[in-house]
Amino acid sequence: MKNVNADNRGAAETPSRWMIVDDSEEILSLMCDIIARFSDVEIKCFSSPQNALAAFEAEPAAFEFVITDLEMPGMSGLELSSRLRAFSPSLKILLATGSEILSNEEAMQKGFCGLLRKPFPLRGVAASARAGGIKISQKNLRP
């Protein structure tokens, strides 16, 4: 698990708390590094969906938003999201995938706030989060 906390938050800001789950260490590191540029986001990153689920079960209120990969060994993003929602039915979850298995509309029908296609641009992560109702700052975004 990688924990990334932005250090330059204002005292009056309430940080968003995100969980990122992807079995690819390279993609996970890239996503965490990209999202860490948002000054108001606290991130916990997991390469194992089982570890992510255990962390969520231990403290469900610690997370407001989840980005999960679709295809992971041992537990798919679909199964992980279903199990996370058993603890927090209103949890906003964004599905990230490089496959063409689902369309954005199909992902939304399955309860996701959207679908993020890999590879994705930095602005794609921000736009998908905002479309899902997550408030994030753009002040540290780079093109």
Image (cartoon, rainbow, N blue to C red):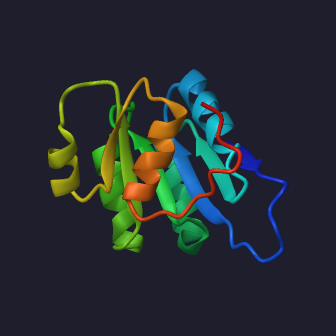
Q: Tell me which residue sits at (18%, 36%) in the image.
A: 102
Residue 85 image point, x, y percent:
35, 66
Instruction: Tell me how many marks there are.
Output: 0
Q: Is residue 55 left or right of residue 77?
A: right
Camera-nearest residue between 11 and 19: 11
Residue 2 image point, x, y percent:
70, 41
Q: Tell me which residue sits at (48%, 42%) in the image.
A: 125
Q: Is residue 4 above or below residue 113?
A: above
Q: Is residue 106 left or right of residue 66?
A: left
Residue 21 image point, x, y percent:
50, 42
Q: Quadrant of the C terminus?
A: top right
Residue 132 image point, x, y percent:
38, 59
| Quarter holding residue 104 | top left
Camera-nearest residue between 132 and 137: 137
Q: Is residue 34 above or below residue 119?
A: below
Camera-nearest residue between 1 and 112: 112
| Quarter holding residue 1 | top right
Q: Tell me which residue sits at (58%, 42%) in the image.
A: 46
Q: Is residue 61 above or below residue 3?
A: below
